Structure formats: C-alpha cells, structure tokens
C-alpha cells in the first residue's frame, strides 16, 4: 500500500487565492472599463456653480478665435429666497421627501420603484431624487434606458459633491417642468397666476 501524502495547507490556499485574485482583477478591469465607457462624454457639473452658465455652444474661426456663443437657456431663474417656504416644502415632500437626508440618491426609493415597476410589468413609478431630476433636465436626454439611468446616478453624485442643497433647489425650482412648455416655478406662477411666486 502506498503511503498517503499529506497536502500542504499552503498549496491548498494558493489554489484558492490565485484564482480569487485573477477574478478580482478581471472584475476591476471590466468595472473600470464600463465606468469609463458610460462616463466618457459626461459633462463636469462645475458649470452649475454659476446659474447663468448653462451649457452652450462656442463657435470658433479656423484660426481659433471665438466668434460667438449660442446658449439655450432653460427656465426662468428664481432665487430660493424669493419662493414661499410652503411651496418649497410642498415640492420637496412630493418630489423627494428625503432630499435633505441623502447625498443625491435615495436607495430605498429606487428599490421601491424597481419592485413596483417589476410588479406592474412596466414603468409605473420613478425613483429619481430632485438631484437626479436636475441631472436629467440639465445634461441628459429623456430616453428610458439602463445606461442613461447609470449616467443620471453618476451626475447626481457629482452635483451633490459640487453644490449645496440650497443651490440644487435653486436650480431645480428654476428648471423643473410645470406643464406644457413651462419650466420652473417662476414661469409657472407667471403663466398660471399672473404674479411672482
């Protein structure tokens, strides 16, 4: 009878550690590549620091001289200080009840919306925060795709890192849709009631 060889525990752990490390490297490379692919053409949100600096198109001559700039400004700017507190509270309560407690993403709300939509067999409920809505209004198209949602999430995190909650609300209140072609609470107030908010 042949003697039974004892397998070294170092050898056994090496058989587990090496494939685990290879798998971790593959996951990091695929994840990093996916992140780069999704974010490669996303704008930086520092443009939001100046409300007047909405993204525009700069036109240059052949010799690189700025000829002009085309801006498509959205909404009617409004200062948070000039909007009644009750209106702000109502908008936050309806659109994003946890606005002051999260950092751009409401994971519970997103999960609730996901489960509701799965149960309904289609999109019935949104899980976007005010910050995500601002990202969509300012930088994204209205298409409903997974990659666009990922881009929205990344932009929301960037916005939260750059702006205060009051600055986010300032922009949102000036840009959010309020029926027809009305963008922002000031435009809606002027159109519906004929007065400033």
Image: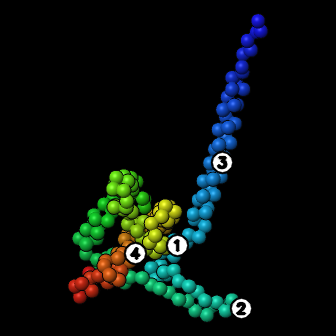
Task: Identify the mark nearer the N-term, 1 or 3.
Answer: 3
Q: Residue furthest right?
A: 2
Residue displayed at 42% across by 82% down: 74
Seen at 40% across and 75% down, the residue is 171
Q: Quadrant of residue 73?
A: bottom left
Q: Which residue is mark 4?
A: 171
Q: Dots 2 and 4: beta carbons under 8 Å? A: no
**16 or 167, which is in the foreground?**
16
Q: CA distance from mark 1 to mark 4?
A: 13 Å
Closer to the camera: disc 1 or disc 2? 2
Closer to the N terminus: mark 3 or mark 2?
3
Q: Is 52 on the left or on the right of 89, as rendered?
A: right
Quarter placement of the N terminus: top right
Tag 2 residue: 63
Q: Which residue is mark 3?
A: 26
Residue drawn 22% across the image and 85% down it: 193
Q: How many discs appear?
A: 4
Residue at the spot of label 1 = 46
**Secondary structure of residue under mark 4:** helix
Foreground: disc 1 or disc 3: 3
Cβ atoms under marks 3 and 2 closer than 8 Å:
no
Q: Whole-Å distance between the Cαs marked 3 and 2? A: 45 Å
Of circles 4 and 3, the one toward us is 3
How far apart, in angstroms, are the residues tagged by discs 1 and 2? 28 Å
Q: Position of residue 135 (x, y in %)?
A: 45, 69
Secondary structure found at label 2? loop
Tag 1–tag 4 contact (CB < 8 Å): no
The answer to which of marks 2 and 4 sits earlier in the sequence is 2
Residue 11 appears at what percent x and percent y?
Answer: 72, 26
Asked if residue 45 is positioned above or below residue 12 in the image, the reply reads below
């Amino acid at each position: 009878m042949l003697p039974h060889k004892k397998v070294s525990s170092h050898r056994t752990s090496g058989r587990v550690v090496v494939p685990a490390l290879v798998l971790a490297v593959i996951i990091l490379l695929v994840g990093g590549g996916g992140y780069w692919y999704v974010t490669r053409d996303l704008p930086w949100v520092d443009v939001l620091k100046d409300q007047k600096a909405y993204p525009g198109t700069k036109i240059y001559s052949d010799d690189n001289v700025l000829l002009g700039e085309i801006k498509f400004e959205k909404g009617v700017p409004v200062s948070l200080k000039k909007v009644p507190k009750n209106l702000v509270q109502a908008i936050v309560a309806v659109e994003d009840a946890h606005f002051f407690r999260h950092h751009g993403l409401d994971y519970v709300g997103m999960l609730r919306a996901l489960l509701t939509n799965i149960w309904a067999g289609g999109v019935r409920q949104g899980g976007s925060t005010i910050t995500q809505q601002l990202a969509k209004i300012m930088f994204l198209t209205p298409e409903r795709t997974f990659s666009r949602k990922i881009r929205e999430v990344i932009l929301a995190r960037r916005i939260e890192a750059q702006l205060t909650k009051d600055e986010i609300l300032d922009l949102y209140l000036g840009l959010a849709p309020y029926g027809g072609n009305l963008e922002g609470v000031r435009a809606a107030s002027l159109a519906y009631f004929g007065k400033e908010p």
